[in-house]
Each structure stands twice: as C-alpha cells, then as structure tokens.
Image (cartoon, rainbow, N blue to C red):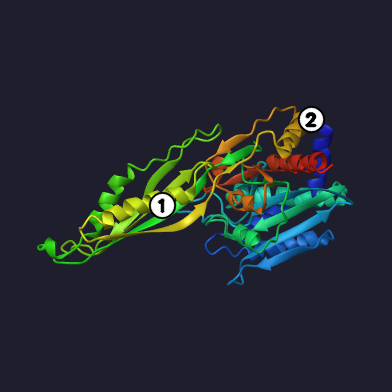
Amino acid sequence: MTKMTESALNEWLEQHKVIEQLQAAIQSNTVNPPGNEILLAERIQSILLSYGIEAKLTIASGTSTRANLIATIRGANKGKTLVFSGHMDTVPIGENVWKVDPFSGELREGKLYGRGTADMKGGLYALLYSFIKCKMENKVTSGELIFAASFGEETGCEGAQEIVAEKRLPPFDAMIIAEPTDNQLFIAHKGVLWLRIEGIGKTAHSSMPDHGINAIMALHQFMNRLKTLDLTVADHPLLSPATLVVTTINGGLKANVVPDYGAMTIDLRTLPEHSHDQIYEDIVRIANEITNNGQGAVLKVSRLLDLPGLTTDASADIVTAIQLVFRENFDQTLVGKGINYFTDGSVFQACGDGHIVILGPGKPELAHQPDEYVEIASIAKSIHLYTQTVVEYLR
Ligand SMILES: [Zn+2]
C-alpha cells in the first residue's frame, strides 16, 4: 500500500469512527455461552442503516437473544456472488487474570484490547467497513456482495447452520471468512468430530464385584481398542494428519461401589477427505464388540459435534484475485496455507460449490487467550485488501 493510500484510508477510518465503533462492539458482551449476539447484531444493523443499507436480522429459533444478520449490495450487472462472513460471539474470558478489562476495548499503542478483538470482532468490523466502503464508492458494479454475521460459531457453528437450513444465503461463488490469520491466506482447515461414549452397567458392593457390571472397566477396554482405529487417508498437502484425543472421562459413585455408569468424550480433528460417517461407524463397531463380549456392560456412542474439514482449490479465482491484490498493493507473494481450527466455512460449504477462504486481521495465537488484542494497522490493511478484492473479483 502506498503512503498516500495508507493516509487516505486512515483518514476514512477516522471520518467513519471505525475504531470507536469497534470499541463499542468489544463492550457489547457476546461471550458464548450464552452468546447474546443480538446486542451486536442490532448495533451492526443500525450502523448499516445509517449508510442507507438495509440488513435482515433473524432471531434464532427458540431464543430472543441470538440472531444472524445478512445484508446485500447488488451491482447493476449480473455477475458473481461474494460473501463476507464473520461470527459475532466470543469465547469466555477464561480463568487467567487479564491486564486490561476484557470488555473495555482499551486502546494502547495502536493495539485494541479485549475479548473478541482478534477472534473475531476485529475481522467482522473490517468486513463491515469494507462492505460500507464498497457501497459508498460504488465498487460493486457486477454481481453481488453479501455481508453475513452469524451467532454461535464458538460452540459449533449453530448460527451458520440456521443460515444454511433457512436458505438465507444464495449459492455463492466465493466467501471470505475474517477469522484471525494475521492477514495470511488460508484455504484449508480440519474438520471436527466430537463423540460421547457412555458405559452402562450395574451397581454392586465392591466386595462382591461378580454381582455387578463395571461400566468404567468397559470404557477402559474401549479406550484400549481405540488404538486400533485406522485414521489414515491420503496426506493433505496443507494439513497435518488427523488426531484423536480422549478429552473427558468421568463416572463412578463411591470407593466401595461397582460403577454402573461412566462416560467419556473424544475429539477427532479430521482431514477434508475423511468421511465422518465412516469414522463414526468404526467407533460404534468397537463399542458394539465390547457390548457383545458377554461381560454385560452396554456402550452407547453419540455425536456431539460433526463439522467437516474444508479445502479450496489453490487455483480458484478468489485465491488468485487475493494473490493479485497482495502483489499489487503490498508487493507480497501470498501462498494459501492450512490451519487446524474449524470455522463457519465447514457449514457454509453446504450452500453449493463456492470457494471459501479465511483471511483476517489479528494474530491467530491470540484467539481465546487472556489480553487478546488486535492491531489497528492490521484492521486497516484488511479493509483495504477486502475492498480491492471486491473490485478485482466482482469486475
Ligand atoms: Zn473465531
């Protein structure tokens, strides 16, 4: 970005009070659970309205405090559909003590502090103000640009699932998700599968174990057998191999009672090539073998979260458009990479065969951490490159 473009952009940010608005967004507590994203959805809706842009706010089913928000700018000519996507919720502030008030939106030496600054209100507002800039400066001549803000991403993309189920997004050609990537381009991420395995047995006095059925021992056998689960698929060029972690285990009543119940959860991070149904079936088969081995315990498997991985062709036109913008504006050669965390992209890929990329301000390692912050310069850079990408992609 030339010095002149940079100072013009900073002037624009100041004129539109972008940082003050982002501070107000940080002060709007959307820690999930419970989420309460309507606070932020209404705030964004009124910002958009002040620029004459109508946005549709949809209350989540069964609540009055959670909502998705979608706005569209249409060009005069037919063309491609590009979606800007971000989530409005944040993770809790955690047990560690923060140096700053996590809901103050405090600005110190060019950094804005608070829960959600990096993950991802910074990115969401960079998209929002790029969207507004595109409207004001008539950058969308062909096709359409959609701004979509979702609730409940951090607990399993519930908002995105409602958007897809209610068909609130058209089949799109490309989507940019502004999760924190430090303005690096990510074109692949892993999927996630959380399973709960419950063991059901029968209590007895532990001095007479033969009268009971030990649910915990059944889970123990299950854990040993899990080692035989084969997760190998073809290597992904951008992602590390799949992982399986036992994350919780609990059960038992007293030191002198044969336990009739125990439960554990496992977390699998998969590659886009994995079939979650196949993995689930394999695990159910292991559980059934233990159920049927004659010792009397019953193991039940249930899915807690099931989101597939994402992989976008490195030669997709949204990827090459972004690469061109980086070359022309920042003299940077950008290569698409892979990440381990999941995004709303897992869900939005069900909208069609659009290409999804992840690109946003803020350092990924600060997400979910105490003293989370985002650099103002990083947000300015994102706004510029989103806007240039719209011009390049929707021409
Ligand atoms: Zn996030």
Can you identify the residue that label 1 sits on? 281
Vertical placement of 93 versus 212: above or below? Answer: above
First-in-chain label (1 vs 2):
1
**Amino acid at circle 2:** Glu
CA gap, disc 1 and disc 2:
49 Å
Foreground pick, 246 / 374: 246
Which of the 4 image quadrants contains residue 26? Answer: bottom right
The residue carrying pointer 1 sits among few (fewer than 14), some (14 to 19) or many (20 or more) residues within 10 Å by Cα, namely few
Foreground pick, 86 / 107: 86
Foreground pick, 272 / 120: 272
Residue 30 position, x and y percent, is 59, 60
Foreground pick, 44 / 311: 311
Can you identify the residue that label 2 sits on? 328
**Amino acid at circle 1:** Glu
Identity of the residue drawn at 39% across and 40% down: 230
Q: Of helix, strand and loop, which one carries label 1?
A: helix
Vertical placement of 57 versus 187: above or below? Answer: below
Pointer 1 and pointer 2: residues touching (CB < 8 Å)?
no
Q: Of helix, strand and loop, which one carries label 2?
A: helix
Is 262 on the left or on the right of 130, as rendered? left
Farthest residue, direction right: 76
Q: How many marks?
A: 2
Quarter of the C terminus within the rendering: top right
Which of the 4 image quadrants contains residue 323? Answer: top right
Is 36 on the left or on the right of 174, as rendered? left
Is 215 on the left or on the right of 167, as rendered? left
Quarter of the N terminus within the rendering: top right
Vertical placement of 101 versus 241: above or below? Answer: below
Residue 360 position, x and y percent, is 66, 43
Ligand 1 within 8 Å of disc 1? The answer is no
